[in-house]
Amino acid sequence: MGRLFGTDGVRGVANADLTAEMALGLSVAAAHVLAEAGTFEGHRATAVVGRDPRASGEFLEAAVVAGLASAGVDVLRVGVLPTPAVAYLTGALGADLGVMLSASHNAMPDNGVKFFARGGHKLADELEDRIEGVYEAHRHGEPWERPTGAGVGRVRSYDEGFDQYVAHLIAVLPNRLDGLKIVLDEAHGAAARVSPEAFSRAGAEVITIGAEPDGLNINDGCGSTHLDLLKAAVVEHGAALGIAHDGDADRCLAVDHTGAEVDGDQILAVIALAMRERSVLRADTVVATVMSNLGFKLALEREGLNLVQTAVGDRYVLEEMKEHGYALGGEQSGHVIILDHATTGDGTLTGLMLAARVAETGRTLKDLAAVMERLPQVLINVPDVDRARVKTSAELAAAVAEAERELGSTGRVLLRPSGTEPLVRVMVEAADIDQARSVAGRLADAVKSALG
């Protein structure tokens, strides 16, 4: 059987791949594994459970709550809140476990289960593997000791979580947003109430789109994966900027006053300079993945900042940050982690910090984002090839070396096998888009020839 846990929890089509039985079983297994690890020792265990507004989240939440309570864990149901809010509340309330039901930017039929450890941090791979093992053992009939009487978990709603999280966001802002008109695209997702409330309390004039979730419309033509509506709204309303979240609001992309996109690399660059000014950018270092635009690396070098790069995935960015004490990291997709204030990517916090920089400097977001020039980037997915031989093929290595010689210091080549599909991703950056397309096309042909 393949590993259930991916880089961001367990995901699949709700009620097909991810069933109520699975959600319940995983929750029981998580309770048992954490109990065996000593997390619950000496006290009665508590878990925070939240979800995004997908229709399937209603029955999956019920299954998770039932599983945890049946294993003797008290449950605080915080309702529809962003993933980073559940992570924050897990830490702030001293809970032993957090559970978020969301498939993030995926389409509505999907859903997912994500566990947080005490403090609001993602579970280690080793713990996820143990949870999966216990889940499989229970599923195949291994008995477990079930608490009875007063030993079963109690369940209550924790409606205070909304205000507690918003207050946290406002408290960490370096300055107010008075005088800024901002359009927020909430992707009909988990931040539909939180984000407008936070920006309004911070002083901004807020216009919202995609803020009417009905359980079926999450990420549907809106949010961080579909920016056209936001671009049009920013220009129409004469706003200073626009902010777009995904379904669970752990991402943030932006739009400047002209309607131009500002991606995660640019957002990271702007926030990095602001943090350095406040002397909170530890070691003058930013952590990003190998997919970050070469223009981002060149901009940091020009500004005297250091860049540490990791494998693709925000969990790898976070691991590097925690291991070395760095304060800022993220991905081109808009996952930005400000570790002094959040244990995971937080789209609302990121948007607030970006807007705060605009308000503080009096400069436009377009001007601030110009600190880096995005080099043309071409990505080609080459399907139906042996992805396992990417690093061992001499033919492919020769093709890559030739491409790198042609591009020189103003370009970059990255070949990356997909973690979930039988394909290889070919990414080429160059100063000229035609050159990037030409080199990428030749490399894609080389991948087919060498690995097909």
Image (tube, rainbow, N blue to C red):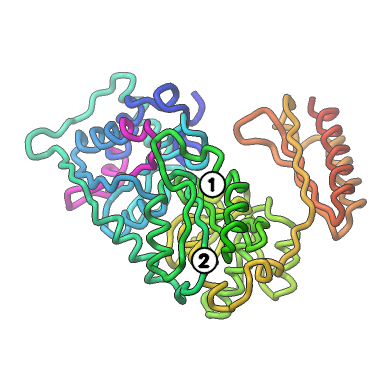
Question: Magenta stretch?
Answer: 32-60
Q: Residue furthest toward the left? A: 149
Residue drawn at x 21%, y 42% as measured from the top left: 73
Front in this rendered view, residue 155 or 122: 155
Q: First in sequence, mark 1 or 2: give its number.
A: 2
Relative placement, left or right, of 260 versus 375 is left
Q: Is residue 69 magenta?
A: no
Q: Residue at x 51, y 27 (%)?
A: 2
Q: Nearer the viewer, residue 243 or 287?
A: 243
Give the percent coordinates (x, y) of residue 219.
Answer: 51, 40
Image spot of residue 233 (x, y percent): 57, 54
For label 2, the residue is: 181
Residue 130 drawn above or below residue 22 = below
In the image, 326 versus 257, the foreground residue is: 257
Is residue 446 positioned above or below 208 on the image? above
Horizontal placement of 242 versus 300: left or right?
left
- Mark 2 secondary-structure assignment: strand
Residue highlighted by disc 1: 223
Q: Circle 1: is it few (<14), some (14-19), or many (20+) Cα within 10 Å?
A: many
Q: Where, by quadrant of the figure, is residue 386 drawn?
A: top right
